[in-house]
Image (cartoon, rainbow, N blue to C red):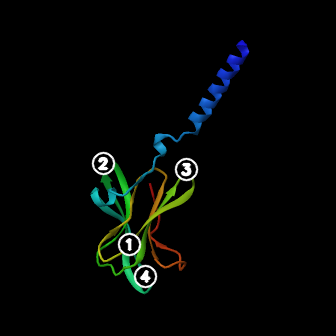
Amino acid sequence: MGSSWISRGVTAAVIAGVTLLGTTPASAASYWSSAASANATSVGTVTEKKVTIGGRTFTIQLRVGKYGSHSYMWARAPKDSDAYGVLLIMQVYNASTRKWESRHEFLNKKTAYTDAHRSVHKYGYKACAKDSGLGGAAPVCTGARWV
C-alpha cells in the first residue's frame, strides 16, 4: 500500500514537471505593439526606399523610436505618398523560429504606420509595400536592418 502512494507521488511530480516545461516563459511574450509607432519619442528613419507599385511611385520608411523603456521599429509611408490602396508591411525576422513575421496596414491619404516591433538582438527588420490585390507581385522592401 505504501508503494502505491509513492508511485502516485512520483507520477504527480513528473506531470507537474512536464507542465512547467511546457509553459511559455514571459520573455517569449509578443513584441508587437499597436501603440508604439504613434506614441514613440526620439523617432528617426533607419532607412527608406522609393518604390513603384501599380504605376504609383512613393517612399516607404523603416523607422525607430523609444516607447516606454524599449526601442521599437515600424514601417511608415509619408502623407500624400500617392500610395492609396497599397499594403504597407513590417517584416521581422525572428531569430528563435528562423522565420519572417509580418504586420500590415492599408495605405490611405494620410500618413500610414504598421504596428511596431520591439528591437530585439539578432532580429532583422524591413519595411515593404505590395499591391493590395490578391496574388500579384512580391512585396518591394527596404534592405533588412539587423539589431
Compared with residue 112, is residue 98 higher up or lower down, i.e. above or below? above
Mark 1 burial class by Cα count in 10 Å: few <14, some 14-19, many 20+? many
In this rendering, the count of numbered labels is 4
Which amino acid does the dot numbered 2 rest on?
Gly
The image quarter in which residue 107 lies: bottom left
Mark number, residue 68: 2
Which badge, 4 or 1, is on the more N-terminal residue?
4
Q: Residue at x 33, y 60 (%)?
A: 37
In the rendered image of this protein, does residue 1 appear above or below residue 80?
A: above
**CA–CA distance in space, label 4 to label 2:** 35 Å
Relative image position of residue 88 (x, y in whole percent): 41, 71
Residue occupied by mark 3: 96
- Check disc 4 and report the residue beneath it: 52
**Quarter occupied by residue 15:** top right
Determine whether label 1 and label 3 are within 8 Å by CB.
no
Depth check, mark 1 against mark 2: the one in front is 2
Q: Viewer-proximal residue, 36 or 132?
A: 132
Q: Which mark is residue 60?
A: 1
Q: Nearer the viewer, residue 38 or 16?
A: 16
- Residue 12 image offset from top left, x and y in percent: 63, 26
Q: Are marks 4 and 2 in contact (CB under 8 Å)?
A: no
Please, what is the three-letter code of the amino acid marked with disc 1?
Ile
First-in-chain label (3 vs 2): 2
Outermost residue, front side: 1
As helix, strand or loop, the secondary structure at mark 3 comes to loop
Instruction: Compute the Cα span from label 1 to label 2.
Output: 25 Å
Q: For the residue marked with disc 3, what is the amino acid?
A: Ser
Residue 13 at x, y percent in the picture: 62, 25
Measure the C-alpha gap from mark 3 to mark 2. 24 Å
